[in-house]
Image: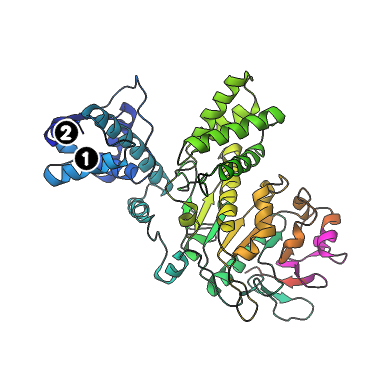
């Protein structure tokens, strides 16, 4: 380093004007009287992210300055701040000018992340403080309760048979007998598809199944919520899955997902090539991407370059390389460039956690209708792909003496018709191949017709298929559940269900109106 502690103490530190105004706003929000207090909080928030921040753009208007000994303190405190900032920088060879620039960039990123946290927590100070504590704990234990610590062990899997009721009541309409579904027994499948029209109770039944599962095995969940009712809303409604699974609720882009979603198994060329191919397949499913042969090859090359040169690699790195590839090849901008620009318009991911950390915790990812379609699609596509690669990196879960196979994680997609039909490779892989790795997939959709876009044997991999009342044509319901399954005649709270191994579907009473 080419500066002294005394020089830092006397230097003027600042960030861009817009971020400085947000810093002032946080003084009001948190009841702080000193400008350096939210600035320190912002620096801490940014330094908790493993990747370096984007520099403040040249030509930006600058905010007010804060002296180094005011911003960082004096003595040991000042030296500690300098050490942390330098340790977080790409190079330890810094001069005073570069240090001031780095601090400006951290201050800017941190205050923006704090603003996202503030909005995500409903502008409630107590919830906001808890969110900051969660970010401080991410590398350790997150929000899991004492009873859930076992699931933090790498490779943790449940033991023993996991059998759950199919809904709140779960009785056979014909016999009155209680009915349960075994997820992990010999010859069983832990995957489920629950279908039904609006208001039929399909999500209510799915949540009841998850409650039964949670009682029997402390598994984490990754849930995609397109309606916004899986977690508790501001009015206190919703299904309270965040309480049931001790889950963190995220709503990108308001709050980026803290996952290194493009993480590699290794830096070997074969793993980079495979990762580039997977990304291309996920990207090609975006509405409007329209990838022909030239575009597919360009997307692959851009992904391969970004993954090779950047660690961790982020979506904006791919966008930058795709622009370069198009320029080098003389290709005019098209749907692929537009789609890349759209998915990078908002901060959807922040690479704070590796997949092996992220998927040991529970998350509810809210993707309500006001979030743009491209953002919702790329979030689901890439997170499912990361989950698929994570599970495939693990050894098979053990099989107990009773034939039950250990379970590791549940992936739930509500309103799954938004994903079904795209033939997303990661979703198919999770359904067809994750059982031996401890994965369980739950898909909640509106109609049996939603599954027609998938391969013919997609539903045959399900351990449970349940269908509530719907006005959809009977052809696909008959194919899935048999000729006797007339969904239009079902009463409130009733469903036809078929478990793997059942000779035919059964009519059950899943729930009753109060």
Above or below, 334 relative to 160: above
Quadrant location of the N terminus?
top left
Seen from the viewer's position, the closer of residues 360 and 307 is 307
Residue 70, given in percent of the width and then of the height, sits at 15, 37
Residue 431, given in percent of the width and then of the height, sits at 68, 58
Residue 199, visible in the rendered structure: no
Q: Which residues are magenta?
A: 477-506
Q: Residue at x 34, y 42 (%)?
A: 46
Seen from the viewer's position, the closer of residues 97 and 307 is 307
Residue 90, visible in the rendered structure: yes
Residue 341, given in percent of the width and then of the height, sits at 55, 29
* Residue 8: mark in rendering: 2
In the image, 472: left or right of 206?
right
Q: Residue at x 82, y 71 (%)?
A: 504
Seen from the viewer's position, the closer of residues 297 and 435 is 297
Residue 318, given in percent of the width and then of the height, sits at 53, 33
* Residue 174: mark in rendering: none
Q: Is residue 491 magenta-colored?
A: yes
Mark 1 — residue?
A: 82
Above or below, 449 relative to 8: below
Seen from the viewer's position, the closer of residues 434 and 133 is 434
Contact check, label 2 and label 1, Cβ < 8 Å: yes
In the image, 422: left or right of 16?
right
Upstream in the sequence, badge 2 or badge 1?
2
């Amino acid at each position: 380093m080419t500066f002294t502690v005394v020089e830092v103490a006397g230097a003027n530190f600042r960030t861009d004007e817009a971020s400085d105004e947000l810093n002032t706003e946080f003084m009001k929000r948190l009841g702080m009287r000193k400008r350096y207090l939210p600035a320190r909080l912002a620096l801490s928030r940014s330094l908790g992210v493993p990747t370096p921040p984007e520099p403040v753009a040249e030509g930006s208007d600058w905010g007010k300055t804060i002296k180094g000994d005011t911003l960082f303190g004096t003595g040991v405190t000042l030296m500690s701040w300098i050490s942390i900032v330098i340790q977080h920088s790409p190079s330890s060879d810094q001069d005073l000018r570069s240090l001031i620039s780095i601090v400006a960039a951290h201050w800017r990123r941190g205050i923006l992340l704090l603003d996202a946290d503030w909005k995500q927590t409903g502008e409630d100070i107590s919830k906001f403080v808890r969110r900051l504590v969660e970010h401080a704990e991410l590398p350790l234990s997150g929000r899991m309760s004492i009873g859930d610590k076992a699931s933090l062990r790498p490779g943790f899997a449940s033991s023993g048979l996991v059998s759950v009721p199919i809904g709140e009541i779960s009785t056979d309409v014909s016999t009155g007998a209680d009915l349960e579904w075994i997820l992990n027994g010999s010859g069983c499948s832990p995957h489920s598809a629950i279908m039904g029209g609006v208001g039929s109770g399909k999500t209510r039944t799915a949540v009841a199944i998850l409650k039964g599962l949670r009682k029997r095995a402390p598994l984490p969940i990754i849930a995609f919520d397109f309606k916004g009712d899986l977690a508790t809303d501001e009015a206190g409604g919703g299904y309270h899955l965040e309480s049931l699974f001790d889950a963190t609720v995220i709503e990108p882009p308001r709050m980026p997902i803290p996952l290194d979603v493009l993480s590699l198994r290794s830096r070997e060329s074969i793993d980079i090539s495979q990762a580039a191919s997977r990304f291309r397949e996920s990207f090609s499913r975006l509405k409007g991407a329209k990838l022909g042969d030239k575009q597919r090859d360009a997307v692959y090359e851009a992904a391969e370059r970004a993954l090779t040169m950047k660690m961790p690699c982020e979506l904006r790195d791919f966008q930058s390389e795709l622009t370069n590839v198009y320029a080098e090849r003389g290709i005019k901008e098209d749907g692929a460039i537009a789609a890349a620009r759209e998915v990078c318009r908002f901060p959807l991911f922040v690479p704070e956690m590796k997949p092996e950390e992220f998927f040991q915790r529970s998350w509810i990812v809210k993707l309500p209708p006001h979030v743009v379609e491209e953002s919702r699609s790329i979030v689901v596509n890439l997170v499912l792909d990361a989950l698929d690669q994570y599970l495939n990196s693990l050894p098979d879960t053990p099989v107990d003496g009773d034939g039950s196979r250990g379970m590791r994680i549940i992936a739930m997609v509500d309103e799954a018709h938004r994903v079904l039909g795209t033939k997303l490779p990661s979703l198919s892989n999770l359904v067809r191949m994750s059982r031996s790795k401890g994965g369980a997939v739950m898909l909640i959709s509106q109609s049996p017709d939603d599954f027609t876009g998938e391969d013919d044997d997609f539903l045959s991999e399900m351990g449970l298929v349940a269908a509530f009342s719907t006005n959809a044509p009977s052809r696909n319901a008959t194919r899935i559940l048999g000729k006797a399954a007339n969904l239009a005649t079902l009463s409130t709270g009733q469903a036809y269900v078929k478990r793997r191994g059942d000779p035919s579907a059964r009519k059950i009473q899943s729930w009753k109106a109060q």
